[in-house]
Amino acid sequence: MDRVSQNCPSCGGELQVTELECSRCGARLSGTFASCPFCRLTKEELNFVLVFMKCRGNIKDVERALGISYPTVRSRLEVLVRRLGLEMGASAAEVLDLLEKGEISADEAVRLIKGRSHERRKA
């Protein structure tokens, strides 16, 4: 079964689910239904989530399974956290610690710290 597009092919706007149908009896439900947050992920991102879960969150196992480096695993996790709206907003000290360890780039550190100060202004 093909994945459902999240964006309108005509204008690019966000599509809404408005009808569900039972594959067994044909019953239909109409309304506006929330979409699954995982449905927004690309096939590659969803595959990464599945591998991460299969490895029970063990980054070393994810590295081996996908043949990628530790910083790449961390980077992909950060992208997924943002895409799923799960950001907790790391403190500047935590961001600098990640930078010092080489786990994120200087550009990523700046983005994270700027995002943190933007969150404080919104509150």
Image: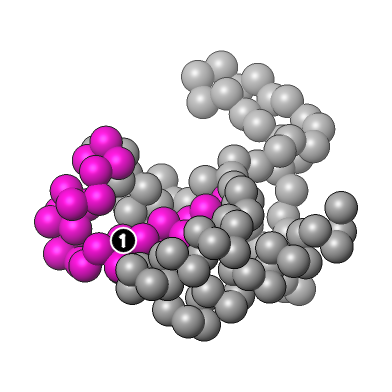
Q: Position of residue 44 (x, y in %)?
A: 36, 61
Q: Quadrant of residue 75?
A: bottom left
* Residue at 16%, 48% in the rendered image: 61
Q: Position of residue 71 (x, y in %)?
A: 30, 68
- Quadrant where the N terminus is found in the figure: top left
* Residue 65 against residue 32 in the figure, above or below: below
54 left or right of 4 in image: left
* Residue at 25%, 63% in the rendered image: 70
Q: Quadrant of residue 25?
A: top right
Mark 1 lies on a secondary structure that is helix
Q: Is 81 colored magenta in this rendering?
A: yes
Q: Residue furthest bottom?
A: 107
Give whichever of 38, 82 is nearer the camera: 82
Give whichever of 80, 109 is nearer the camera: 109
Give whichever of 74, 80 is nearer the camera: 74
* Residue 65 against residue 113 in the figure, above or below: above
Q: Amino acid at mark 1?
A: Val
- Can residue 5 be seen in the rendering of this structure? no
Q: Position of residue 88 (x, y in %)?
A: 61, 49
27 left or right of 109 in image: right
- Mark 1 highlights which residue? 73
Disc 1 packing (10 Å; few <14; some 14–19; many ≥20): many
Q: Position of residue 72 (x, y in %)?
A: 31, 68
- Can residue 28 be seen in the rendering of this structure? yes
- Where are the magenta residues, as a range? 55-84
